[in-house]
Image (tube, rainbow, N blue to C red):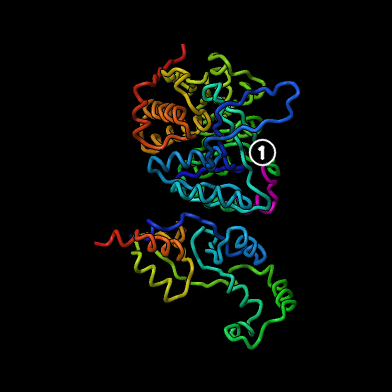
Amino acid sequence: MIITVTLNPALDKTYWVDETHLPLSVGEEDRIMRAHRSLSEPGGKGINVSVLLARLGMESVAMGFLAGHTGQIVLRGILSEGVSANFVWIEGETRTNAALMLPERQAASLKVHEEGPTVPARAVEIFLAKYRHAVARAEYVVLGGRLPPGLPDDFYHQLALIAAQHNVKTVLHTGGFPLQEAISAGPYLVKPDIREGAVIGDEAVSTEEEIISAGHHALDRGAKMFLVSHHVTGDVLVTKDAVWELDARVTLSELRNLVGADDALVGGLLYQLKKGEDLESALKFGMAAALASSEAEEKLVRSRQAIDAEMERIEVRKRTPR
Amino acid sequence: MKAHEFMRKDLTSVDAETPISEVIYVMEQSGLSSLPVLDDEGTLVGVISERDIIRAALPSYFDMLHSTAILPNLNQLGRSLERISQRPASEFMARDPVVVRPSDEDLQVAQLFIRRRLKQIPVANEAGYLVGVVRRIDLLNQLSRGGILRDRR
């Protein structure tokens, strides 16, 4: 079984407008932009991975915290995709994350992310009890996204340790301190979230050399694999005996929506690894899933066929260290 | 159509040790009027409903609720609920609850809804783990759109 954990889920609301005319001109007080299209989808890294897996026909259980009416909408969205849901209900409202797609800039968007409701101590206890039961019967756990208010920075570390006790492979897909804290729990795959700056701890990860160096540090601390976005259409994977360069042969003008592409990469990769495929095939499939998702207007690719169609545009190169 | 095809994969549940006050909270937040109860291992051991809680608070009046003769005093109901608020779900749940298997037929499930007057029934697999819940309204919805009838040859 695969479990995905989204501790601070969101309702992802996307708007498409004809033009924004940003920035506001001098003397202008406000502006109304009319959306010719909008879409509401359940969101959050773990949830996105579950949805991607479900679209490929693979089951998973999504766990985390939900609140209020927005939480009900998110739950409904998750269930309608064929994902099993085992969330803990808390007070308040699950957050809404808005993305305004900028027609003037291909695939770029202006985002407003809410913080999310505070998780009370009792809800954390209930979640941990459910998590322990679930993990005992799982093969993979995906820990993804920002921590909500109310949870300590070492929470992912705690969850990764519980998973390690049951020999469950953990995929860690987050950033900042929570990522740093959790690496020592020996996660199977670390995919740092560097959307807010190409830095992990105090290490820069802009060039390939920097990524390899940061990767080796993470591996020394217990991680088995380290996967980082290198540029818009490429990633680098560092394992103890190799460095893999992953590239999508695509022009930026073909990209429509980059939101969720990272999660499609993790989902696609996990899908093939669970089926027993070798790492190289799994990486290629993951990148194809990310590419197919980026070319779609919606967040995540809808079909297996769309992913397969991209496979020949993915290059996977293995470099063994000197 | 089999149960797993129209079940809702919502695994919302409470534990045998969950206090009644929390059971009520989960019911209110999730919109479910009855909840599966799981044991330490995570297997399904019971179902607790709003009726079970009301009956627990007002045992002697409960049987008379079907007549209009007596309406319980609400302050009394409030006090009684307070008395049982910290008691565990296991104390008032229905042990040996009606459970559906993922492979059960829609007709079997429909008969359970009607005969037992249930709005939702937990679905558990062979090992006893909760995998979803079948809801009467979902079946009703499917039937009114002709979905199930289309499957029948």
Residue A193, compared with residue B67, is above or below; it is above
Residue B100, compared with residue B63, is above or below; it is above
Residue A242 visible somewhere in the drawing:
no
Residue B23, compared with residue A116, is above or below; it is below
Give the quarter of the image for residue B146. bottom left
Q: Is residue B110 left or right of residue B36?
A: left
Give the quarter of the image for residue A303. top left
Locate residue A88, reporting x and y percent.
Answer: 60, 52
Quadrant location of the N terminus of chain B? Answer: bottom left
Locate residue B99, reporting x and y percent.
Answer: 43, 67
Residue A120, compared with residue A170, is above or below; it is below
Look at the image and give the residue range highlighted in magenta.
A116-127
Locate residue A186, reporting x and y percent.
Answer: 55, 33
Locate residue A154, reporting x and y percent.
Answer: 66, 38
Give the quarter of the image for residue A192. top right
Find numbered disc 1 in the image and state the secondary structure of the residue it sits on.
Answer: loop
Q: Would you say residue A52 sits in the magenta stretch?
A: no
Pick the front one: B110 or A256: A256
User: How many other residues sit within 10 Å of disc 1, few (<14), some (14-19) or many (≥20)?
Assistant: few
Residue name at image x 37 percent, y 21 percent: A313
Pick the front one: A38 or B134: A38
